[in-house]
Image (cartoon, grey):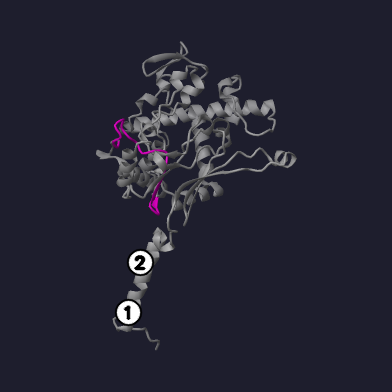
Amino acid sequence: ANFAVNTYGDDPCEVFDIHYLGSRKIPKQEMDIEMRMHKAISVIQFKLEGQTIMRHPEFNMDSRLLLDKIDYDKGTVNIEGEEYPLNDTRFPTIDPEHPYDLSPKEQEVMTRLVHNFRHCEKLQKHIRFLFKSGSIYLTFNDNLYYHGCVPLNEDGSFREVTFKGKVYSGKALYDFIESYCRKGYYLTGKKNKEKIYGQDMMWFAWSNENSPVFGKEKMATFERYFVSAKEAQRERKDAYYSLIEREDVCDHILREFGLDPATAHIINGHMPVKPKAGETPIKCGGKLLIIDGGFSKAYQKTTGIAGYTLIYNSYGLRLVTHQSFQGLEKAIVEETDICDEINVVQKLNDRMFVADTDNGKILKERIKDLELLLMAYRTGVLREAVKK
């Protein structure tokens, strides 16, 4: 806060206005400080992202190097060959000759932030849980779960991405990205090149057009802050999103992950759905299901709902649509309830038994191992240990 106030004290930072959720009124003085903090950390973000892009030409993100595309005298920026006026031209910490270098004070801020992140017990607990329990895709009980998309070309084929001189696509792309994200977390040594590459890969996963968990041409954060033109702010989605109604595309994806298209489903997260605009979470005749759809309160005005929950049990698959909760007081005064809509996606003719699930297969293998162990004792292959 001190850095932001001292550096941007005479800057209104109007384009860094903060939209607060809830009814709490924020004092103007507090809002002014937070807007300056917002701008300060955003400029640092663009500098550090630029450094990462320049370290990794294989990420193919040179179009996101924008600080060196600013004409600081004219107050304009060149984005993909087009010149746009800037909404904000105050950049006290940027050296036009070396726009991606942190100032000494910015470096001090980052050093403190890194220390605080590394020594925050709750944050570290959450991150450990994510790496211990999570993955960027999962195959379970004949279903394929993933977040975002599978990067596709316009013809529905898997897009090829090159890392370290090797080409990856489909499942192999997922596996490569996740393996390096894990190296970035688990490997030790500040100068360990594989660890550093893994940390940069985590940023790639968050923001690159070839990342399965992002799925857009670019993340137009800079444009939304500094450029009014809507065409500059546009984030074009991956071809995947226009192809998921095609059965051959969904079948191709399922086979890539080792599943049978005749029985398997794709469970897709992080895809806001707009039911009030006529959109549905059930795609490709029920072969692909969307289970995000706008749980975040910020999305609910756009989606018209509070999201979806998938119920999968021995009877089949059901998708539940949740209505937004307007508050306890309104529910009591108006005697309203939350009415969820249930769609039956798949009803099994015969109920599924535990033996038919992935856990059931594991239990069967354990039973076989125990039976073999018992036979080994009974036939004398294994001798019982006798205490002397």
Few, some or many C-alpha atoms within 10 Å of disc 2 (few <14, some 14-19, many ≥20)? few
Find residue 155 and report its image quarter. Answer: top left
x and y, in percent, of residue 239 in the image: 36, 31
Residue at which label 1 appears = 375
Find residue 3 and report its image quarter. Answer: top right
x and y, in percent, of residue 69 in the image: 40, 18
Residue 118 relative to residue 187: left or right: right
**Residue 135 colored magenta?**
no
x and y, in percent, of residue 154 in the image: 31, 30
Residue at which label 2 appears = 365
Few, some or many C-alpha atoms within 10 Å of disc 1 (few <14, some 14-19, many ≥20)? few
x and y, in percent, of residue 336 in the image: 69, 41
Q: Which residues are magenta?
A: 139-158
**Residue 154 colored magenta?**
yes
Quarter of the figure that contains the C terminus: bottom left
Predominant SS along the magenta part: loop
Q: Is residue 189 visible?
A: no
Picture residue at 60% right of the left edge, 31% below the top: 1
User: At label 2, which amino acid type do we have?
Assistant: Glu
122 or 303: nearer the viewer: 303
Picture residue at 37% right of the left edge, 83% below the top: 385
Which residue ends up furthest to the top in the rendered image?
Answer: 74
- Lower sequence index among marks 2 and 1: 2
